[in-house]
Image: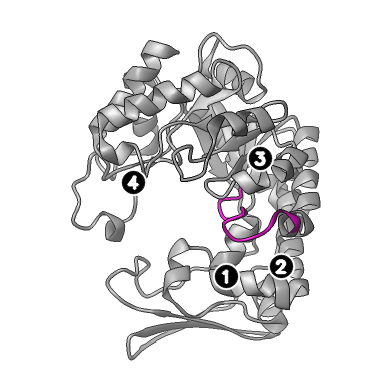
Amino acid sequence: MTSRERITAAVRREPVDYVPCCIAFNPLNEVQRRGHRWQFPWDPDTPRDEQLRYQVEELDLDQVVSFGVNAWQALEIEPQIRLEDGVLHKSYDTPAGVLHAAIRYDEKWPHGRDIPFYSDFNIGHYVEPWIENEQDLEAFMCVRRLEDDATIRARAESAAADARELADRWQLATMAHCGMGMTGAQHLFGATQLCLMTIENPDLVDAYLGYEHEMNVRILRALCGCNVDMVRRNGFYETADFYSPAMLERFLGDRLRAERDVAHEGGMLMTYTVHTGVMPILDYLHGLALDSLFGVDLAFPGVEPRRLRDALTDVSSFWTGPSSTYHLWKGPDATRKAVRETFEVFAPEGLVLSPCVSAHSIMPWESTLAMIDEWRRLR
């Protein structure tokens, strides 16, 4: 099988010549790397195609070529940025009112004198989040106005063609990243604030998710016919760590199933990132019937891998393996043991061996090599 055939068959839970291994290599940013040594065997500024060549030819991995599609209109409103008493402010003066956010500006803030809309770092630094009420959402949608369908289609075709050209050098699969749902909402609302908002002002949460769902569907439709193998929806924080199964179904269920159906209509498989907080939502995840689940941390307290497999393997495959947190950091022996345990439970069909959720540039490189070596022995 080619790598493309192998990994798409695994996602479909079909027989493969051997279990594929795909590793997301996370370079981290300079703030995250501070005090640690760079461990990847390529430099931080190595071009993407050379990194991919090393991963495929030297490490023998079944990598995917990922890309995104920009659905926003060119920004016409210039932001105002100011730093006062250790607090960084950013605001936009829009027709719907002022959109404003403020964060604690300290040594752990990685974005310089900027506050992006979507960043995990927002959550721990917020003094005032981007969206607190309906007017904020209206102003946000003025700044992040969606493009027309023809423009989105042209961008999708261009991005998919570039990804396919790179993937075809090694007969790899392509994957479009599309949608962040409640993960993106946390970045905008704040984590605690969003959890409270689902109870105190669910209509506002629905309005944001409806806006994002429209964007996702339009991108997915634009990707139809572009020879893309898979799409991946970010559901990292859409779990029982924050919400009950009923709440997830109420806010996300129909939207996720609709996005799945559009992806399928376009000949694309749909993978979904979930990391922790999965055991209480197995029935909910089964009802989503998404092709594959990416990044479930098998070592997280309370996770039962066999129960997870038995509950979902008839509808979803798994991208899973050694935990970034619990295994890769502990070295080669713990990592090898995790690979063996993953194979015992999930192999041979319906498994893409992957670290959960990525190998970081500051983690022991020996652990990643041990994962790959144990995979070669067992695959």
Q: Could you tell whether 373 is left or right of 114 in the image?
A: left
Disc 2/disc 1 C-alpha distance (Å): 10 Å
The image position of residue 243, as x and y in percent, is 65, 60
Dot placed on the residue nearer the N-terminal end, 1 or 3 = 3
Q: Which residue is mark 4?
A: 27
Disc 4/disc 1 C-alpha distance (Å): 24 Å
Q: Secondary structure at mark 4?
A: loop
**How busy is the neighbourhood of tag 4: few (under 14 within 10 Å), some, or many (20 plus)?**
some
Q: Which residues are magenta?
A: 234-246
Q: Secondary structure at mark 2?
A: helix
The image position of residue 178, as x and y in percent, is 63, 47
Q: Nearer the viewer, mark 2 or mark 3?
A: 2
User: Is the residue under label 1 in contact with that under label 2 (CB below 8 Å)?
Assistant: yes
Against 9, residue 274 (above or below) is: below
Tell me, yes or no, whether the highlighted magenta stretch contains residue 237: yes
Q: Which residue is mark 2?
A: 208
* 67 and 193: which is toward the camera: 193
* Residue under the point 18% across and 47% down: 37
Where on the picture, by quarter, is residue 318?
top right
Q: Secondary structure at mark 1?
A: helix
Dot placed on the residue nearer the N-terminal end, 4 or 1 = 4
Disc 2/disc 3 C-alpha distance (Å): 27 Å
Q: Main secondary structure of the magenta part?
A: loop
At label 1, the amino acid type is Leu
Q: Could you tell whether 287 is left or right of 90 in the image?
A: right
At label 2, the amino acid type is Tyr
Dot placed on the residue nearer the N-terminal end, 4 or 2 = 4
User: Is the residue under label 3 in contact with that under label 2 (CB below 8 Å)?
Assistant: no
* Residue under the point 67% across and 74% down: 197
Dot placed on the residue nearer the N-terminal end, 4 or 3 = 4
Q: Which residue is mark 1?
A: 188
Q: Which residue is mark 3?
A: 157
